Amino acid sequence: MTAGVDMGGTKIQTAIVRSGKPLGQARVPTPRGGPGEVLESVRSTIVDAAAAAGIAPADLTGVGIGFPGAYDNKTGDTVSAVNLAGFDKRYPFGSRLSKAIGGAPVIFDNDVRAALLGEYRAGAGRPFKDMLGVFVGTGVGGGLILGGKLRRGQGSAGEIGHTVVSDAGRLCGCGRRGCLEAYAGRGRMELRARKLVERGDSTILFKVMAEKGRDRLTSGVIAAALARGDNMADQLITDAVWALGIALASVQNVLDLEAIIIGGGLGDRLGPPFIDRIGAAMQPHLFMDSRPPKMLATELGDLSGAVGAALLALDAGAPRSQAAPVR
Amino acid sequence: MTAGVDMGGTKIQTAIVRSGKPLGQARVPTPRGGPGEVLESVRSTIVDAAAAAGIAPADLTGVGIGFPGAYDNKTGDTVSAVNLAGFDKRYPFGSRLSKAIGGAPVIFDNDVRAALLGEYRAGAGRPFKDMLGVFVGTGVGGGLILGGKLRRGQGSAGEIGHTVVSDAGRLCGCGRRGCLEAYAGRGRMELRARKLVERGDSTILFKVMAEKGRDRLTSGVIAAALARGDNMADQLITDAVWALGIALASVQNVLDLEAIIIGGGLGDRLGPPFIDRIGAAMQPHLFMDSRPPKMLATELGDLSGAVGAALLALDAGAPRSQAAPVR
């Protein structure tokens, strides 16, 4: 049995996994006091998830961490992560965590790749060998499985969020203009909403945010405002669907994939109706329009990343000949 | 020794190849009288190229044809090709050609894939395992080598020409709007030039075309007008560079490739200055902007397709265990 940890800017989600099945899980908000506090939170989720699975942390054969930044698996250090407070220099996260939970080895991988791997091996992607995973949350992350293997490229393959959907279009968090993420990422949607409100447009988005006790436009806030017929929320999602339609159709034309899986906070929350709209927006741009890719929701939802991270730990602990294939 | 035939809408280019080197070649304009005439032209280029290489056609162990349409390698039939007059129904091209040249087996593949394979194994792509080939000619074709293997997807991977660079932009030959090919394909450039002339804009493009005795804006006509400082030619190429910059940067962000090879009639004719401009246009959109892909001209030029087709014939004739890897 291995543990997987999805270490996000908002929450830490941990799962204990055997044979691709989550047997216990635990989740806490990500603390903002730096690596030491985050380490303690990760440790506590592992203890709680292990208890839920009926085991002790010392029984784990490995821990995988889906990390939203740079890491060094040789030393077990985290190196940097812009969305995690205090992670701006090296920290011996892996070795300290391993010691704190009774010795299981800790391995890091990219958070988006971990989520894609979870869906590919234990979720909606199981029937396919060629797929794109698109995780629509604060940003828009992506990953590719081609011919049954995770595509890493020179190290950063899968950055679907920074495909160009409109030259000189909206400003993206990366500093460039017209990226997919500038339209479909929740973070840029919030900036856009604030700008429209400043201009005098009306919306219930910020009222819903306050009602829910949030300090930002979470996926839940956007979904609730949409359900209540808010025009601005509808326009933001319409723009996101438009941008996703262009970006995903272009990728499909180049790669001729079997399936595209849409997940992430917003993707999971809005679910199949959102995914169907994206499929419809792609259709006019598809070169092989009689053979569109299957458009899928995640099966593991919030747990994609944690389950994928646990599978990475499993592969890392297996003899080399078994660890080589991704599936 | 094998022969490779690049069967284009404009010309038929044949080469005799041994160990990846062209030993003899021949070229004729593509006749417009249907498959029988084209067959005779292909036969004559094989005879001439073989003579130049100092062999007889009967010495060939195989013939590969890079075909711009649909084919059936089980029967050896060509099925259809919109850019070849008369190729609108099945024709036993392979079996008749084989008989006419003394029995060498004939195999078909896609023309763009053949050209990419030629550059990958015998041209500019030799140092790389992960690359995109972009062939800028009448249209814009593309092909991918990923991890040392030709990517076929569900059968039509590589259609870079139909990535979307501007939603609701210029009309493409495929009937959609804003495709890369609508800006960078020579065919759409010509339509654009005619439209601008109708509007009253001035250009020497059509005068150069007449001087050269052409009935369309060939790559040579465009290059000559550019060299003579024609504003309209410059604007057409500037638009093409802009569109290629967006499309290739987006693909690079998703695939994190080592190299991009630019060929085709226009790519080969305009060469490194054109390719460097495309690289510069990509730069602002690259997510990993400190590590852009190598931007390469073809090494085989006009012969990429014929050499690649000959290598396909070589692979097809090799024992199965040798034929499996692409390189």
Image (cartoon, coloured by chain):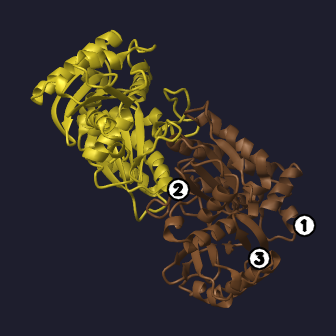
Chain colours: A brown, B yellow
The CA span between labels 2 and 1 is: 44 Å
Q: How many marks?
A: 3
N-term mark: 2 or 1? 2
According to the picture, the residue beneath numbered tag 1 turns out to be: A211
In percent of the image, x 53 and y 77: which residue is there? Answer: A71
N-term mark: 3 or 2? 3
- Tell me the element at label 3: strand
In percent of the image, x 41 and y 39: which residue is there? Answer: B142
According to the picture, the residue beneath numbered tag 2 turns out to be: A149
Q: Quadrant of the N terminus of chain B?
A: top left
Q: Nearer the viewer, mark 1 or mark 3?
A: 3
Whether label 1 touches label 3, CB < 8 Å: no
Q: Quadrant of residue B144?
A: top left
Categorize mark 3 by other alpha carbons within 10 Å: few (<14), some (14-19), many (20+).
some
Residue B91 against residue A111 in the figure, above or below = above
Name the one closer to the observer, A161 or B42: B42
Q: Nearer the viewer, mark 2 or mark 1?
A: 2
